[in-house]
Image (spheres, rainbow, N blue to C red):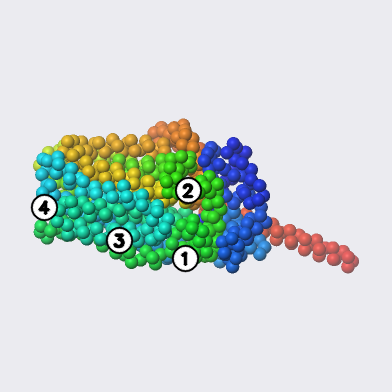
Amino acid sequence: MAEPKSMSTEKDSDVHRGSEAGLPAEHIDLNSNLTAKIRNPLAGIPRDVLLRNVEEFAQEKGMVDQVGILKKGALVAQDPSNYEDITGEHALSTEEVDVLRNEVLHKWRQPMALYVTIVTCSIGAAVQGWDQTGSNGANLSFPSVFGIGNEDSTHDTLLVGLVNSAPYIGSAFFGCWVSDPLNFYTGRRGTIFIAAIFCLLPVFGSAVCQTWEQLFVCRLLLGFGMGAKGSTVPIYAAENSPAAIRGALVMSWQLWTAFGIFLGTCANLAMVNVGKYAWRYQLGSAFIPAVPLLLFIYLCPESPRWLMKKNRYFKAYTALLRLRNNPIQAARDLYYIHSQLEVEREIIGKSNYVTRFLQLFTIPRVRRATLASFTVMIAQQMCGINIIAFYSSTIFKNSGFTEFQALFASFGFGLINFIFAFPAIWTIDTFGRRALLLFTFPNMAWSLLAAGLCALIDKEKTAHLALVAMFIYIFAMFYSPGEGPVPFAYSAEVFPLSHREVGMGWAVATCLFWACVLTMFLPLMLSAMGTTGVFCFYAGTNIVALVMIFLWVPETKQRTLEELDYIFAVPTRTHMHYQLTKALPWWFNRWILQRKGEVLEPLYHFDTSTDQDRIDALYAADKTRAEKREGNTSDLQVEDQNSDSTEIREKN
């Protein structure tokens, strides 16, 4: 959905006057947006020029038959708050007005095709979670089967870590980076389909391998699919979703990952007493969620933005018709996205794979997105979640649990991780990505610290088992609605379309590379530092991650993917200066000193910034139109009275 334009009209150093050749009245530098203005690329274009541009656009893209609805869509995109005031031949019908109002009043009222698309591809995320917990349970038995189970041997400990980290090695060094060319040649759906094959066949191989080397190779191949899928599915979801609920829909990736973790813990428990082959069933069961992904992905529409990138505009319009409730929304989104892509081309130009990768660090607007995505992704490893996802059974067993108790405690972790992911469906677009992270990281820090200190209690005491498990569960309660869903949703939306695939590849590779490092060396850390030392170490890294997020991660909630160009055009130093000199003092005064009258000056200048703002603006516009109609009616009545009086005088 095209969001309302900014009201700011000052003449600043980063604003350049356009011409009547089709440029906006004010054009903001997308590499240095010093005043943090969020601008509609169609704002300020005269109506006749805009309509002429639409005609040329329709002619160029082979959409002459749709020129009427495209003109309506362009007028709505230009001024999203006042579409009911459009007059003449392009005035909206009652049905079109109602469907646009429902975007604000009933934002979850979306076509079934959109929800089916999101659910289908996100089911694939369950492979990731299921595999993590499959190896979690298998860790208790496969090392001894393959002769690498000597806990006193550094060599054996490293080999177990290497096998566990193999999917992350495959993802970080191959799967994530191959997603860009795969997307280029096969599209979003094609990439997801190929990735699903690699998430299916290697899982079967893991269940029947005869040596640790074979298991390592199978899990390495699984990583190829996990990396390509993890780099593409969130992008695909983000590009298909309306801005108002994009975060909630994209976070379905994490919801299904959490569901996969939960199902994996269920499988571990179900297989615990089947005998010496239990670990094979635990690893092999992860194939299940890959099947619906393979079967149904091509029943979903291709990403409209990818089709537009390939200059297939009519197919993009057709896809939008399936993903939106009414053709007016599809036409509006099509022309609005096209207009912003034209602005992007001004600063990026043509590029190939190598130049796109280099531009992640050289073009200022893209570099800021790279820094932000790097921060949220590495923070996922710094928070300590993967030490629990991969090694919770081992940690619980080291804390004095029996094997069954350890698996049952891990089941509890998986269940809590899944249940507490649901609140993020509402909070991620209400409170925002950044706010969720800033709230949850301090709470994850103290809960891990408490779990580590409770591990010092005598293992023979019931309090030891109960308190360690309780604080790990509390950690999961804060992780699931915060650092769980945010990194993938955030990284999928922050890059411009031209760099979205390689940027997401970079972000996921960052996450999974450090997951690989931590997974490989955690057994050594446990041996050297003990359970208490490891938990306390990760409590500290949570605080470091909190500081990084505070300084380097801008908010993106409820903005279109195209409007984010303006947010990431704000220099990092401007963002950091605002956080340190405005946001931090406000927080201290408001929450520490309890000064309720403190008001925080906003960094970004929007017409509206929350759902309630949009609803209030809608009702305010209704009131203004009603008053205008009443005024016109009164004027007509006065004119009629004057006319009657004149007629009477003339007769007399």
User: Which residue is labeled 3 in the image?
Assistant: 197
Q: Nearer the viewer, residue 91 or 64?
A: 64
Q: Residue at x 76, y 60 (%)?
A: 638
**Where does residue 449 sit, x and y in percent of width and height?**
24, 37
Say if mark 1 contacts mark 3, CB within 8 Å. Answer: no
Q: Is residue 260 left or right of residue 558?
A: left
User: Which residue is labeled 2 in the image?
Assistant: 351
Say if mark 4 contacts mark 1, CB within 8 Å. Answer: no
C-alpha separation, residue under disc 1 versus residue under disc 3: 27 Å
The quarter of the displayed image where residue 636 is located: bottom right
Say if mark 1 contacts mark 2, CB within 8 Å. Answer: no
Image label count: 4
Amino acid type of the residue that numbered disc 2 sits on in the rendered structure:
Ser
Looking at the rendered image, the disc whose residue lies closer to the viewer, 1 or 2, is 2
Say if mark 2 contacts mark 3, CB within 8 Å. Answer: no
Looking at the rendered image, the disc whose residue lies closer to the viewer, 2 or 3, is 2
Looking at the rendered image, the disc whose residue lies closer to the viewer, 2 or 4, is 2
Amino acid type of the residue that numbered disc 1 sits on in the rendered structure:
Arg
Q: Residue at x 25, y 36 (%)?
A: 537
- Sequence-earlier tag: 1 or 3: 3
Looking at the rendered image, the disc whose residue lies closer to the viewer, 1 or 3, is 3
C-alpha separation, residue under disc 4 versus residue under disc 1: 52 Å
- Sequence-earlier tag: 4 or 1: 4
Q: Nearer the viewer, residue 339 or 271?
A: 339
Residue 381 numbered tag = none
- Sequence-earlier tag: 2 or 4: 4
User: Which residue is labeled 4 in the image?
Assistant: 145
Other-residue count near label 4 (Cα within 10 Å), few / some / many at <14 / 14–19 / ≥20:
some
Amino acid type of the residue that numbered disc 4 sits on in the rendered structure:
Val
User: Which residue is labeled 1 in the image?
Assistant: 322
C-alpha separation, residue under disc 2 versus residue under disc 4: 51 Å
Looking at the rendered image, the disc whose residue lies closer to the viewer, 4 or 1, is 4
